[in-house]
Amino acid sequence: MRRIRRLKEISQEELAFDAQISKTYVCEIERGSRAVSIDVMGRIADALQMPLSELLNKSE
């Protein structure tokens, strides 16, 4: 997710705002220290303007 966010030149703050989650949560997700619900992953995919399935495939 971090790689995709950086490629799209989106800050953690912007992603957090667009996905309606905290910046801390974004940071924890990117570090792999926090589990993520499918609902939140869907909101992140929307914020990154990509299909959820594509985000999940790139996150493996």
Image: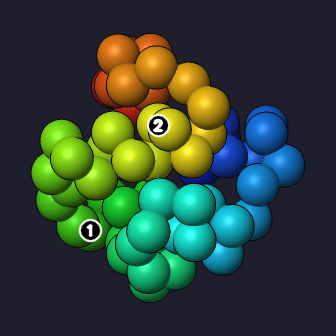
Q: In terms of image quadrants, where is residue 54? A: top left
Q: In terms of image quadrants, where is residue 41? A: top left
Tell me, for residue 33, which label it has, or none: 1
Figure coloring: rainbow
Mark 1: few/some/many CA within 10 Å (<14, 14-19, 20+): few
Residue for point 57% across, 71% down: 17
Q: Quadrant of the C terminus?
A: top left
Which element is circle 1 on? Answer: loop
For disc 2, the marked residue is 45
Q: Amino acid at mark 2?
A: Ala
33 relative position to 20: left or right = left
Q: Amino acid at mark 1?
A: Ser
In the depicted structure, whether residue 2 falls above or below residue 55: below
Mark 2: few/some/many CA within 10 Å (<14, 14-19, 20+): many
In the depicted structure, whether residue 38 falls above or below residue 54: below
45 relative position to 7: left or right = left
In the depicted structure, whether residue 2 falls above or below residue 28: above
Q: Earlier in the sequence, mark 2 or mark 1?
A: 1
Q: Nearer the viewer, residue 10 or 2?
A: 10
